[in-house]
Amino acid sequence: MARVGSQATVTVTARAMWRIRLRRELSRRLLQALGVMGLIASARFAIAPPRPVIVRSSTPSALLPDRAAEGFASLFARRYLTWDSSNPEAHDSALAPYLGTSLEAGAAMQPPSSGAERVQWTEVVQARVPAPDEHVYTVAVQTDAAGLVYLSVSVLRRADGRLALAGYPAFVGAPSTTAASPPAQLREVQEPALSTVVERALRNYLAGSESELAADLTSQARVSLPATALALQAVRSLDWSPDGRSVVAVVQAVDERGAQYTLAYELDVTSADGRWEVSAIQMDPTT
């Protein structure tokens, strides 16, 4: 039952009109501001789109290997030293794209009156940079008639990026070499368990027994088996590398034809829970 004489109370609070309008229009103003910012961003991307950041090598470009120029020199050497006396025009035609009007036909090379010569392989073995836009390559060329010869070929990288000969080639001598260096004095492996694992791993590695090899590898090991299967005959020596994280094994092996080899392998090894495992053999196939 309602109490007799009770009355409702109404409280009136005065507020500034500008605050009421601000609260009512704030959401609409924010949406409009976001729309304007989106239009500005779209215009900025259309006028000046972002460009990828290119990290440039600190090595001067003139000192970096120019694989295209190396190939250019090798191909020229192959064509220059391939000839057949019964068809001298073929030699000139093969060299014509390299010479233009600057050099004589056939690079001024005239084949003898009889015989022929074929190039079996070429390999760039030396390079020097006499000028920022020029590389001089020494190309080893194995021929079927003259044997192994060395040809010096100068290649220009023009301002437009194209490659060109800088002049006639030259026959030169081989890069200087000397006898093999004696092996470093290493610390012999004295742990029978490690020797057993290394010998077993190399035996399976050389034989191409991937499943058997896996038993001696770490879970992260990456190993690529040789294409030619070999049978391990003996481990001649097993020593620690200078950093102590790998071992160097000198082994004797034989292939299915009976050819015998003395080979050296470096194996990364690690000990886990008292058991030795191999994490790499001589090379990393993923790099």
Image (spheres, grey):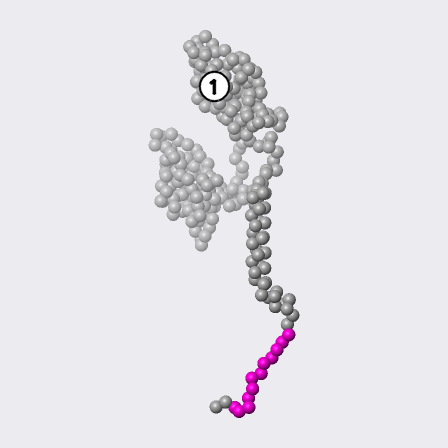
Q: Could you tell me residue 147's position as x and y percent?
A: 46, 18
Image quadrant assignment for residue 158: top right
Left of 183 or right of it: where is 85?
Answer: left
Tell me if residue 282 comes above or below residue 82 in the rendering: below
Q: Sort mark 1 into few (<14), some (14-19) or many (20+) by Cα contacts within 10 Å.
A: some
Residue 10 on the magenta segment: yes
Q: Which residue is rendered at x = 59% and y = 43% of the image?
A: 48
Q: Could you tell me residue 254's position as x and y percent?
A: 38, 33
> Is the magenta region chiefly helix, strand or loop?
loop
Q: Which residue is mark 1?
A: 79
User: Looking at this view, is 49 or 244 the one in front?
Assistant: 49
Magenta segment:
3-14
Q: Which residue is rendered at x = 64% and y = 72% of the image?
A: 15
User: Looking at this view, is 105 or 25 the one in front?
Assistant: 25
Q: Could you tell me residue 59's position as x and y percent?
A: 61, 35
Q: Is there any visible trace of residue 229 in the rendered image? A: yes
User: Looking at this view, is 253 or 140 the one in front?
Assistant: 140
Q: Which residue is rendered at x = 43% and y = 37% of the image?
A: 251
Image quadrant assignment for residue 9: bottom right
